[in-house]
Amino acid sequence: MKALKTLSLAIALVGPTLAWAQDGDDDFEDPTYSGGAVKPIVEDIEDEASETSAQPEVAETIRPYPDKVYEGARVLNMDVAFVNACHEAIEMVYERNYAEAKKAFEEIQRRYPGSALGPVGKVLVYQALMLENLDFRYEKQYELASNKARQQLMEALETRGNDAWEHFILGGILGIDAIHTMRRGNYFAALSRGLEAMKSVNRSKELAPEFPDLLVGDGLYNYWRTVITRTTKGLPDFSDKRTLGIEQLKSVEEKGIFLGPAATFALTFTWLEEGALKRATASALRNHKAYPNNVVNNLQLGRLYMYRRNYKESERFFEMVISVSPENRRAHYYLTRMLVRQKRLADAETHINKFLSFQLTKRERANGLLLKSQIFYRRKDWNTAESLAREAWKVGKLKRAKNRISKISRARNREAKKD
């Protein structure tokens, strides 16, 4: 039972990432992570205008850095120039200015030797690039940087001073590795990393109890633990702490020094899980306003508008992704799904062929072939549709491929009877 509890904890910590990886069925009727098995605790907003509402204005100040930087320096008891340099470098990652972000992190390490921020910056950049496509293209570079960052942070912790910050960064590095390991399917290794991460975060809380960013982990855990344990057989049930988790994430969204945008992105998945599509869209639009080129956020906006059947906006955001990252295969896949819904079959075929031209995993290729089969099914080209469905089954052993073959057979028989 203890192992099940700790495993549920590790899964809950990476709930939004697991949700991000879900492709759903061809018609994407139910975009929520749990499939509606957990009764929502919020209702969707009615005011569409709230999606694009302006953020609260910040009072002008003569101080050279943003107010949150001074607050970060206070709660962490650190040099304000150092905190500002870290804040600016992390903003570059959100902005998808990856090359400059790596340079900025390396410059911080040059100015503050022993900070470990050179390899930390590379960890953030390589993970961001891989999450855009949910692939492992930069795994070697990531692992090298991650190992170096952990080693340097452990060395830094041997010297007193800045301990709250160093535990915070170490917890983040370990948490990222837990997510990466989970994506690889190594669940118990991910559990180990997740527990290590929590120890570092808890130590940071002891040293800097007013540091608002530390609530991100609590918010994710409290919300997603409830969702996942109540929808996964074999995991123990817990009390419902979704409301608490949401409030903790909203607190970081408002007060976070470094992780405010990350909390907003986490809330996007939270509202999606709750079935509150307008609130989810509003969260994603908030990040889009600040970081218009962020691929992961724009992909989510494209999907949200697709779920809401606002296909014009959905297409706009997917095309935005392609303009920034032409090799993003997920944008082509979701564009295909959206175009099939609109019966724009020629355009859909163009995008699915582009998707299938990339180097894909077996499961990705099988999903792509099955989606292409749907295009030919809509054209009533039964032979081609069946051939593609059979290939999808052969490549990825998808149960949906078997179902598609049966569906094609029934449709063919119906057409034959009409003749």
Image (spheres, helix red, strand yellow):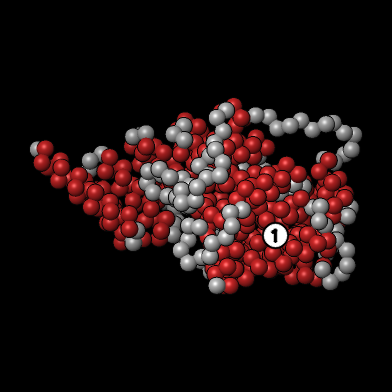
Look at 55% across and 30% down and name the residue there.
46
Compare residues 70 and 248 and report the one nearer the observer.
248
Callout 1, which amino acid?
Gly
Residue 356 in sight: yes
Residue 239 vs 307, above or below: the answer is below
Q: Secondary structure at mark 1?
A: helix
On the picture, is 206 further left or further right than 246?
right
Look at 88% across and 63% down and name the residue there.
161
Residue 162 sits in quarter: bottom right
Residue 330 in sight: no
Residue 163 vs 307, above or below: the answer is below
Quadrant location, the N terminus? bottom right
Give percent across and percent down for residue 153: 77, 66
Quadrant location, the C terminus? top left
Q: Residue furthest front?
A: 239
Give percent across and percent down for residue 302: 51, 39
Give percent across and percent down for residue 194: 64, 65
Give percent across and percent down for residue 129: 59, 53
Crowding around mark 1 (Cα neighbors within 10 Å: few <14, some 14 to 19, many 20+) is many
On the picture, is 274 further left or further right than 203?
left
Residue 189 vs 352, above or below: the answer is below
Compare residues 340 and 256 and report the one nearer the observer.
256
Look at 74% across and 70% down and name the residue there.
151
Residue 323 sits in quarter: top right
Look at 60% across and 63% down and name the residue there.
9
Total numbered labels: 1
On the picture, is 13 further left or further right than 65?
left
Residue 152 sits in quarter: bottom right
The residue singled out by tag 1 in the image is 172
Compare residues 33 and 175 and report the one nearer the observer.
33
